[in-house]
Amino acid sequence: MSTPVVTRFAPSPTGFLHIGGARTALFNWVFSRHTGGKMLLRIEDTDRERSTDAAVTAILDGLSWLGLTWDGEPISQFARAARHAEVARELLASGNAYKCYCSPEELTEMRETARAEGRPPRYDGRWRDRDPSEAPEGVEPVIRIKAPQSGDIVVRDRVQGDVVFKAENLDDFIILRSDGTPTYMHAVVVDDHDMGVTHIIRGDDHLTNAARQIVIYQAMGWAVPEMAHIPLIHGPDGAKLSKRHGAMGVEAYRQMGYLPEALRNYLARLGWAHGDDEIFSTDQMVEWFSLEALNKGASRFDFAKLDNLNGHYIRAADPARLYDIMVDTASETGRNADYAGLVSKKDTVLAAIPELQPRAKTVLELIDLAQFIYASRPVVIEDKAAALLNEDGLTHLVGLSAKFANLDDWNVENLDGTARSYAEEAGLKLGKIAQPLRAALTGRTVSPGVFEVMVLIGREESLARLADATATFVQA
Ligand code: GLU
């Protein structure tokens, strides 16, 4: 039986969970679920200056919102510093690493000489074979790995294929600093090994690191995990993803009104494909996933595609769940009036949601579309809608209001019938009547069916809003 798969997501808590990180987490998660394995979470918080608790919280929240659960407790890389130092000392003892006493001045000089001679600025190995008795007094050394000096280091990558690095281009890099703290390169290897990670799936900006990390694995005699380096996400123009093009934290997507299942589906398609399938459930994703189907080329972020997918998932969502998301989104984005309205008119909003679903691509659009329900009078009329409330339009509203007021039963059928016969008598199309009605009732040119609107807000409110609109007309 083969070893169970263990993947990991290893974010550095220096900011929010950005969209590229979320996609890396998704692929690790999906692969672990597909194989019946585990996904572990490691917080790479060794950079004490830049790591913050707020970022850790934002990352955990972002993952939870996306439904990407990890197994066990998150592991702090910083907390494992003693173990990193221990492995560095083991490498020292086995002759695979050595102490280097170079001063900062010497290193600067080394770099400058290399640059002047047109060589890459790499450590020249001057302490590699030097006798430790030559160590200067009072200087705490760093520990450097003895990297191979010739031959190739091959990253056998499941996405990129075999990627060959010339050993001569890698230097004896530092694994333990003079203050006893590990370098990032070293910590990652020790952690991945100790955590039993079998598969490393991460951005291809780590490909060169992979070559260095392999040096440490080999020096320790540890098995190198399977690697899959995925191309980064680019903007629609092919350039590095910028904020305008989507390089934001996952919470920004939540606040823009995207549903987690839509983002999961979208992110999966950004870098992975299953035939021509564009829309698939998370279960299908888990069932179909394979590392081999990860794309080799960079993918381009496209808001229009994400909007379309989100529209699909909004239409498919349970109205009660959408209601809760609308309330949370209004609250989180400081839309206080919307929040208050959604809460106070809960039943009406709930009843209206099926009417709103086909018309919205984001939760923010759903909220906008629901505003007519709790709008306070007189309803604010948007410019486009105001144009419909011209003399003609208002004249019809006066006539119609009188007929509506006489209805015994306030239902869609009666309202529709009344408006139709009014239009017929006036020799007009129903649209000519419905448009000013919608404008007066909702302040907008887009809403659910206007008679549905009238039933949702009720007789009294409908007649009052129509009266508000015509009152301005009479005064004018
Ligand atoms: N902490 C690294 C990052 O956030 C990931 C390291 C890794 O996956 O090996 O880019």
Image (cartoon, rainbow, N blue to C red):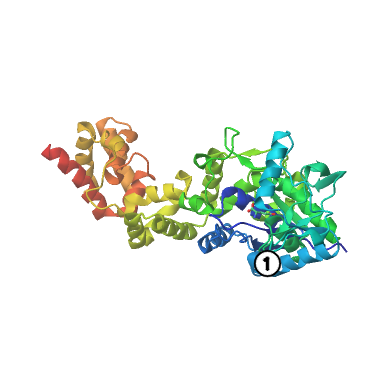
The kind of residue on which mark 1 rests is Ala
Q: Residue at x 72, y 52 (%)?
A: 201
Q: Residue at x 60, y 33 (%)?
A: 238
Asked if residue 329 can be seen in this view, the reply is yes
Left or right for 104, reference 406: right
Q: Residue at x 81, y 47 (%)?
A: 155
x and y, in percent, of residue 87 in the image: 77, 65
x and y, in percent, of residue 337 in the image: 31, 55
Comparing 386 with 25, the one in front is 25
x and y, in percent, of residue 449 in the image: 38, 44
**In terms of image quadrants, where is residue 179?**
bottom right
In what quadrant does ligand 1 lie? bottom right
**In terms of image quadrants, where is residue 135?**
bottom right
x and y, in percent, of residue 11 in the image: 62, 57
Asked if residue 408 can be seen in this view, the reply is no
Comparing 357 with 395, the one in front is 357
> Dot 1 lies on which element?
helix
